[in-house]
Amino acid sequence: MRKQLYLISVLAWMLGLFFACSPSADKVDVLLVHAEECMEIHPDSALRLLKQIPHPDRLHESQQADYALLLTQAQDKNYMDSLQSDSLIRIAVDYYQDGDDKVKAGKAFFYYGRVLSNRDKYTEAMAAYLSAQALLAESSEYKLQGLLAEDIGMLNYGQRMYDASILNFKKTVDCYKLAEDTLGIVYAYRNLARGYMMTESNDSARWYANEGLKLLPDIKHRVRSSLFQILGMIAEKSKDYETAIDFLKKALLNDPNTLSQYNYYISLGKVYLIMGRLDEAEQDFKNAIKGGKSYTQAGAYNYLFELEKVRGNYERAIFYKELSDSLLNIVHNENLQQQLLTLQKKYENEKLRMENEQIKLEKRSQFYLILLVAVLMVISVVAIRTKYRRSFQRNMDIIRKNQEEIKKYAFRIDGYNRKSEQEQLAKKKKIADLNAKILLLAAENKELRENTCIKASCILEQLNKGDLIVQRMTLEEKQSLFDFMDLIFANFISRLNANYTMTKTDLILSSLLKVGFTTKQLMFIFDCERNSVYRMKLRLKEHLCIDKEKSLEEFILFF
């Protein structure tokens, strides 16, 4: 009897220790409530409150879902890079999607969509956003609905679906008006102006930009600068260069963010370059170089390359072109490295999540096992008082047998869990390797396309200026020109070769006619008389099976 009482005491101590390790439920609820209350105005304070919760992996289901949603929201509002992994927000999505709280379910799907969008999974992100939109449709969460419509619009805008993005941004305006969020309305007007500008609806773009400026009068804010930049770009398209310069200078004055100003310097320098005010353009491009990001600096050096070509200083132009290409390569390598680090971090986060799930499962199994043993022990104590010794012995034999079976089942469960974990890790490694190969091949294709375009553009420019004639073109230069025509005009050269019997001269003449070279230019390029050009065109017509009465240029243009 004493032995049995001792075992029960040890069991009670173990249960007390287990529950003592878990965070207080009341304390966690208070921290979660306070974090949610200050999320909109003080997201940094909300993040600090959430980090005070000890052992978040030990929270029960509803608390863990609230914690996952609030932590993801705080990380997003504090512009942290933790949104690269979806393991955290998936906890909230899985819990809320079948529940009755549609607002929290909508928030969970919204932030899940943001995580997927940051990982360039645009199709899955759109599906998550649409789920969130359906859940929040009848709620009064107008600001959240505005953010949701804005993110959907940005996805459509990024996919060049400008008409669809305009409809999304108009819905954003309606939601922000209901939320009485003036700054949100201005941002929505800015996005609408950009969408209309991409569809060549400059009058509508100008109207929305001016309406946005009216809502934020006489204050310095970066959104005002972006609206001034849009108005400057519209004026540039209309060839009203002085007005464009005025708007772009206002953009520089109204943006307190120094990093954003470098883009405005490039836009301003571009207008000066078009106007032929080369010294002012050069100064603006050099201002953009001083502290901008590598991609911005590369763009500024490229414009300096164009500027020096206009001046006829080709040696200096080549120097700037080499700097631009070098910076673009650096940006490409940095992007590739960041993608690899993100992939690695995702793998590590997924591994950690699986390990935490395994630990929780094991602890839960241990708890139930201990509880079962305790019940059996209590039953055995009662049996001692009510039955004979033989019955007691028989019960003890049954208990030992059950314990052995429990150990066997627990061992088998552990084996299944380890096997499943190993299979998942192997699959994730294969996926990571394939994604890395895809990134490398895509980068290589992009670099080859850029090199082909740059080289072919130089060849066409030399031909246009009369610095190069066809007879002196190398095989490599001819092939670069053909590759460029295939790339730009949907396999133009390849389709000609597939459908007709063409010579190299025919292909070169077809390429030059495709890009608009005149007969006078062709005389210089082929170093021949007008009659010779006329005969070459006749031979090309014969090879293309075109009637003499029909226009060769028209055929080439629409082929």
Image (tube, rainbow, N blue to C red):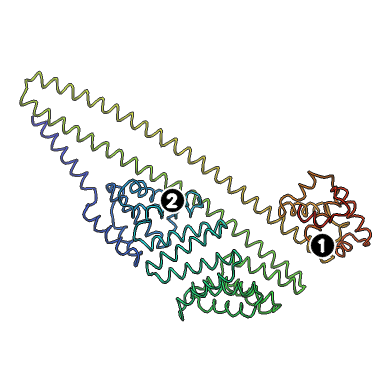
**Pointer 2 local density, CA inside 10 Å: few below 14, some 14–19, many at least 20:** many
Q: Nearer the viewer, residue 219 or 530?
A: 530
Q: Compared to 552, does 189 lie above or below?
A: below
Q: Which residue is drawn at 76% across and 69% down?
A: 314
**Looking at the image, do the residues carrying marks 1 and 2 touch, with CB atoms under 8 Å apart?**
no
Can residue 107 be seen in this snapshot? Answer: no
Q: Where is residue 59 in the image (x, y as percent from the top left)?
A: 28, 48
Q: Which of 496 and 29 is in front in this view?
A: 496
- Which numbered disc covers residue 128? 2
Q: Where is residue 347 in the image (x, y as percent from the top left)?
A: 46, 46
Q: Compared to 44, does 387 lie above or below?
A: above
Amino acid on which the number 1 mark rests in the picture? Phe
Distance (Cα) linking label 1 and label 2: 51 Å
Q: Position of residue 170 (x, y in %)?
A: 47, 64
Q: Nearer the viewer, residue 443 or 513?
A: 513
Q: Residue at x 72, y 59 (%)?
A: 454
Left or right of 124, for residue 365? left
Left or right of 111, for residue 153? right
Q: Compared to 39, does 122 lie above or below?
A: above
Can residue 23 be seen in this snapshot? Answer: yes
